[in-house]
Image (cartoon, rainbow, N blue to C red):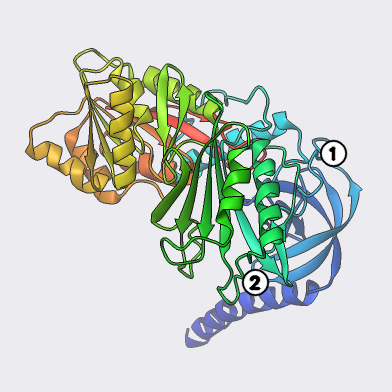
């Protein structure tokens, strides 16, 4: 009996080591292997296999048969670079962007748009079933963009010094190396006029770009915002200096920028922290107004430098209308709009509800939200500054019964305390707007344990040619 136990233990310990050793022996760095891509990873990279060993390769699609060079081998997977495309995927198209294989902004420029939509809908289904544990969820057809080009109303463009030269563009995949692209297919065309103007100013006046390794230089980022509904434009230059210090010959830059069509606001933002956060907390307005105004549906929306505003205005309007339709708001309803930002969702719900309360942690956003309510003459809308998980609990103490709760949290999803309070309030409906199907699935599962039923989820292609989607989900008691 003792011998039998000893043999069992020996087999249990050695087998995994042998398996890992075989894979490492069979597949190593600089090997060249042929794979067929069968799936897409979370960053948009293709997934293939060599003898059941997973290999990730950028710029590949399901159906591609390609030759890859192994760059890195881990215990469970490897990363490869495509050397040769042997048989292209039937969904592959010629990318209209000449740097899409290098730029980290878009993952699917080389994929048919209809196939992109299918892939994103599948991602939502997988998240809800595998992570959320929902069986046969009611997923409505994904909402496409009629024209998936030139849709972004905000651009944050790094400005870097590389080998003594000024580089303005976007980060390459998996790095902070700049890829210059004067003809981006998804940004507003005014962005490139702004970039050219800033570049001309920096070269003419000897203003240094930010050097990331040693944290020197002056200009770190260009943030451009466009209000497609009104044509107004805002430029924010993020500076690596102390608050109030202006770059040399800044009058020359302001004069040139102010001549760009639609320019309404020019601002310097100060961020000399050694972090990857784009904007600092303090703004210094040097020309025009301190905000721009967009027109969304029937509402005028005030947007400041730090305002959260959906980057695709066309889809944002459809999302808010879908949320309103899902909620089936009654005239005597009280609505809580958590993570409300500058109050856009609250404006739409205030059209039908008796009272709407918005909760937001960013002071500037609350100020904009109050202005938006005032400008649009909406009186049944109140905004409260604070953490959603703290403020919503106060509603119980104040005996305010929320019939509907709308949430639009960041990618990390809702705070657990917030979800527990939502379960305690027992609102009739929870409308969850999400940019991350995984955290949506997690939070929906928590609410399902509290008695809520996932009635429907509708995906929207908010971020065309990227791996991301936006989802509106309805949960009801």
x, y percent for residue 183 = 76, 42
Real-space Cα separation, disc 1 to disc 2, in angstroms = 35 Å
Task: Determine which quarter of the picture holds residue 474.
Answer: top left
Asked whether the beta carbons under mark 1 and mark 2 sit within 8 Å of each other, the answer is: no
Element type at marker 1? loop
Please name the residue that numbered disc 1 is placed on: 94
- Asked whether residue 156 appears in the rendered view, the answer is no
Asked which quadrant contains residue 401, the reply is top left
Q: In this rendering, is residue 160 above or below 187? A: below
Seen in the picture, residue 231 relative to 60 is either above or below; the reply is above
- Tell whether 132 sits left or right of 391: right
Query: Residue 171's image quarter?
Result: bottom right
Q: Earlier in the sequence, mark 1 or mark 2?
A: 2
Residue plotted at (19% across, 28% down): 402
Query: Could you say which disc has been placed on residue 351 in the image?
Result: none
Using the image as rendered, state which of residue 313 and residue 215 is in the foreground: 215
Which residue ends up furthest to the top in the rendered image?
A: 331
The vertical placement of 378 against 35, above or below, is above
Crowd band around label 2 with a 10 angstrom C-alpha radius: few (<14), some (14–19), many (20+): few
Q: Name the residue tied to disc 2.
A: 75
Q: Residues within 10 Å of mark 1 (few under 14, many from 20)?
A: few
Placement of the C terminus among the 4 image quadrants: top left
Q: Nearer the viewer, residue 228 or 81?
A: 228
Q: Which is nearer the eye, 430 or 307? A: 307
Instruction: Name the residue: 60% across, 75% down.
Output: 213
Image x and y of residue 111, in percent: 76, 38
Give the residue at x 59% y 45%.
255
Does residue 62 appear anywhere in the picture?
A: yes
């Amino acid at each position: 009996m003792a011998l039998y136990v000893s043999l069992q233990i020996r087999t249990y310990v050695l087998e995994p080591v042998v398996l890992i050793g075989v894979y490492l022996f069979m597949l190593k760095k600089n090997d060249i292997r042929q794979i067929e891509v069968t799936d897409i990873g979370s960053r948009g990279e293709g997934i293939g296999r060599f003898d059941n060993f997973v290999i990730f390769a950028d710029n590949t699609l399901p159906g591609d048969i390609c030759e890859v060079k192994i760059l890195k081998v881990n215990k469970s997977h490897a990363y490869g670079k495509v050397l040769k495309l042997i048989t292209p995927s039937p969904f592959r198209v010629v990318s209209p962007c000449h740097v899409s294989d290098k730029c980290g902004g878009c993952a699917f420029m080389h994929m048919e748009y209809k196939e992109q939509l299918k892939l994103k809908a599948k991602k939502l289904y997988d998240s809800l079933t595998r992570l959320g544990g929902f069986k046969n969820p009611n997923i409505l057809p994904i909402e496409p963009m009629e024209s998936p080009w030139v849709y972004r109303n905000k651009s944050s463009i790094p400005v870097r010094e590389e080998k003594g030269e000024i580089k303005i563009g976007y980060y390459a995949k998996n790095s902070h190396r700049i890829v210059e692209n004067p003809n981006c297919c998804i940004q507003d065309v005014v962005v490139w006029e702004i970039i050219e103007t800033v570049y001309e100013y920096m070269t003419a006046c000897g203003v240094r770009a930010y050097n990331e390794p040693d944290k020197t230089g002056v200009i770190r980022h260009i943030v451009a915002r466009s209000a497609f509904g009104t044509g107004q434009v805002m430029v924010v230059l993020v500076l690596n200096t102390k608050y109030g210090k202006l770059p040399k010959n800044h009058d020359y830059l302001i004069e040139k920028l102010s001549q760009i069509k639609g320019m309404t606001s020019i601002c310097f933002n100060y961020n000399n922290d050694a972090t990857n956060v784009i904007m600092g907390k303090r703004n210094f307005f040097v020309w025009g107004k301190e905000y721009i105004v967009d027109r969304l549906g029937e509402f005028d929306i005030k947007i400041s430098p730090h305002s959260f505003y959906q980057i695709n205005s066309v889809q944002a309007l459809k999302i808010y209308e879908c949320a309103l339709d899902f909620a089936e708001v009654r005239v005597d309803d009280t609505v809580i709009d958590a993570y409300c930002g500058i109050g856009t969702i609250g404006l739409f719900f205030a059209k039908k509800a008796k009272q709407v309360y918005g909760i937001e942690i960013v002071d500037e956003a609350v100020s904009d939200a109050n202005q938006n309510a005032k400008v649009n003459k909406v009186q049944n809308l109140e905004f409260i500054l604070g953490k959603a998980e703290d403020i919503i609990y106060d509603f119980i103490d104040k005996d305010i019964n929320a019939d509907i709760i709308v949430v639009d949290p960041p990618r990390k999803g809702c705070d657990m305390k917030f979800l527990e309070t939502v379960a305690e309030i027992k609102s009739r409906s929870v409308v969850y707007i999400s940019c991350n199907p995984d955290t949506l699935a997690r939070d929906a599962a928590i609410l399902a344990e509290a008695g809520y039923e996932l009635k429907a989820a509708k995906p929207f292609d908010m971020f065309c040619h990227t791996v991301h989607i936006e989802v509106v989900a309805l949960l009801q008691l």
